[in-house]
Image: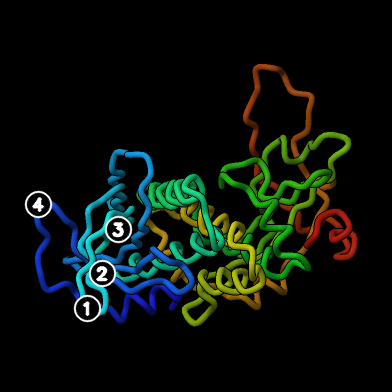
Amino acid sequence: MTALGELYALLSQPAQQESATARIFSVLPIRRRPGYFVGRGVNDDPALLIEIRGRTRAPIALKNLLVTFNTHCALNVDREQRDTYAVVIQCLATDAGLRNYFLMIANHLLDGLGDAPTTDEVAAAIDALVSLFQKLSRSPRRQAQGLFGELLVIGTASNAATLLDAWHADPLDRFDFTFASSRLEVKTNANRQRRHEFSLEQCTPPADISATVASLFVETAGGGLSLNAPVERIEARLGSKPELILKLHSVLADTLGTGLQEGLGQRFDEQLALSSLTFYDLCTIPAVRGPLPPEVTAVRFRSDIGLVTPMDVQQARRLTPV
């Protein structure tokens, strides 16, 4: 449980109902952050409240998130009521998992703000949280299997921060990882065969760009490692880099959408995946290669790379920081 989650668990639901003029919350102050509170609303909704008077903005209302600005609030603090005006960021979800997720993300946002954030920095953090919850309202864009493979590659890399910084912002980007002079694509297969789908562009990178594919077997396993486990491992390795932790969760939300909670609970055979992890030069795999008629575009194909000579791990690390 995160620090904000622990504070929220200590709070009782407010005894009184909200009036027409004030929102009511039971709150606890957040350590070392004057004017910042964790709150519990009249419907048990977890909330982050920030005493700050800035420019007036229209409320932001999503399925599971409500943000209101310059909000008149009655805060129950240590059995005393305190009237104030605040930005109220409230999770409307009834699902306990999503409520905990909200508190965890809010915790990372506060870590990224530092000790004395400006009004603009607070506004940017709120916008980042809103963007993430917007992604959670969309349909899943990819399956958890491929995501598990990418997370394992990040988690076992010599420099997880470098790989995460290079990770795609959009799960449909051409390559999973983009570095200055190299690219890395991760392919998974649940049938223990190195047959993967590629695009023409992936297999014909520019002359000054090296392109590598990491191939691994990823099978579901009832007693295996949950998708959330490598996420937590990566967070632990990132330490004091909250901006990268937020990127990690943004990509997860963008990829899994409404299936986030279910996806994070899916379990896979970690040992099989790690033992099968092999690297190949994308320029050497069987592929459709140009030139093609200009009328032919968006070429994709399935290639069996099982008989291709793999790259030495040290060679792969020289090209990409895996």
Q: CA distance from mark 3 to mark 2?
A: 9 Å
Label 3 or label 4, whichever comes before in sequence order:
4
Q: Position of residue 212 (x, y in %)?
A: 79, 51
Label 2 or label 1, whichever comes before in sequence order:
1
Q: Which residue does the numbered mark 1 point to in the structure image? A: 12
Say what amino acid the circle numbered 4 marks. Ala
Q: Which residue does the numbered mark 4 point to in the structure image? A: 20
Say the numbered circle drawn on residue 90: 3
Residue at 72% of width from left, 74% of height from top?
275
Quarter of the figure with the N terminus: bottom left
Q: Which residue does the numbered mark 2 point to in the structure image? A: 40
Say what amino acid the circle numbered 3 marks. Gln
Residue 105 visible in image: yes
Quarter of the figure with the C terminus: bottom right
Q: CA distance from mark 1 to mark 4?
A: 22 Å
Say the numbered circle drawn on residue 214: none
Label 3 or label 1, whichever comes before in sequence order:
1
Q: CA distance from mark 3 to mark 4?
A: 18 Å
